[in-house]
Every structure is written in structure tokens, then in C-alpha cells.
Image (cartoon, helix red, strand yellow):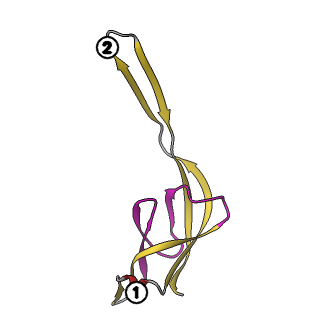
Amino acid sequence: MYAVVATGGKQYRVSEGEVITTELLGETGSVVELRPVLYVEGDRVLATPAELSAVAVKGRIIDETKGPKIRGFTYKSKSNQRRRWGHRQRHSLVEITEIGMA
């Protein structure tokens, strides 16, 4: 049994007990409900919005991490105009605790 969930503009294939890295969802220890896009259990596949309304995918945020450092540099020639910048995206580690019919 597995499900495909959508969060943060991305889709993840998850099963119970699995840990995924998503964009920041909340505080550590809180429970989140993820939106299913597809649900597969044996030969049974649910994919339409009407069928997926009965499916619940729940997870628990276990930690908060940071992604890789992105460095940028812009300049305009002949005018001594330069700018350095950096960014580091924050992520949530989510453990999938429950997948099933609600």
C-alpha cells in the first residue's frame, strides 16, 4: 500500500513509516495531513477526487533542516555596481504515520 501526496508544489510517493523531506510545514512535533493525489492498495487504485476524499494521509514533523546554500552574484560592468547574496531553504522532515481510508 502506498500513496502519492502533493505538498509544496511537489509530489512524493510515500508509504507508512517512511520519512520524507518537504518544504517547511510547521513546528516540530505537530501532526500534518497531506493531500493525496493517488492511492494504491493491492489491485485497487483510487485516483479521482471523489474517491480520494475518503483517503487520509497523516504524518508527524520530526525535525527541521536546511537545504544547500545557494550563492548568487550580480554586477553591472563599468559602473562598480556589485551585489552578493545567498539563500538556504528550510525543510521539514515528515514521518508518515498513517495511510488509509478515513
Which corner quadrant holds the N terminus? bottom left
Q: Which residue lies at the image location 40% right of the left edge and 61% below the top edge? A: 10
Q: Distance between the residues labelled 2 and 1?
A: 57 Å
Q: In which quarter of the image is residue 70?
A: top left
Q: Which amino acid does label 1 sit on?
A: Ala
At numbered mark 1, what does the secondary structure look like: helix, strand or loop? Answer: helix
Name the spot of residue 60 as percent of width and height, x first: 61, 68
Q: Which residue lies at the image location 48% right of the left edge and 32% below the top edge? A: 86
Q: What residue type is labelled 2?
A: Ser
What residue sits right under mark 2 in the picture? 77
Name the spot of residue 83 as percent of width and height, x first: 44, 22
Vertical position of residue 52 compared to residue 7: above or below: below
- Residue that sits furthest to the bottom in the current view: 43
Residue 47 magenta: no
Vertical position of residue 37 compared to residue 68: above or below: below
Name the spot of residue 58 as percent of width and height, x first: 56, 75
Vertical position of residue 63 compared to residue 99: above or below: above
Between 61 and 26, the residue placed more toward the observer is 26
Mark 2 or 1 closer to N-term? 1
Question: What span is colored magenta in the figure?
Answer: 1-30
Between 92 and 85, the residue placed more toward the observer is 85
Label ID, residue 50: 1
At numbered mark 2, what does the secondary structure look like: helix, strand or loop? Answer: loop
Count residues near mark 1 (Cα–Cα under 10 Å), then give few for <14, some for 14-19, many for 20+. Answer: few
Q: Are marks 2 and 1 in contact (CB under 8 Å)?
A: no
Q: In this view, does 29 lie to the left or right of 86?
A: right
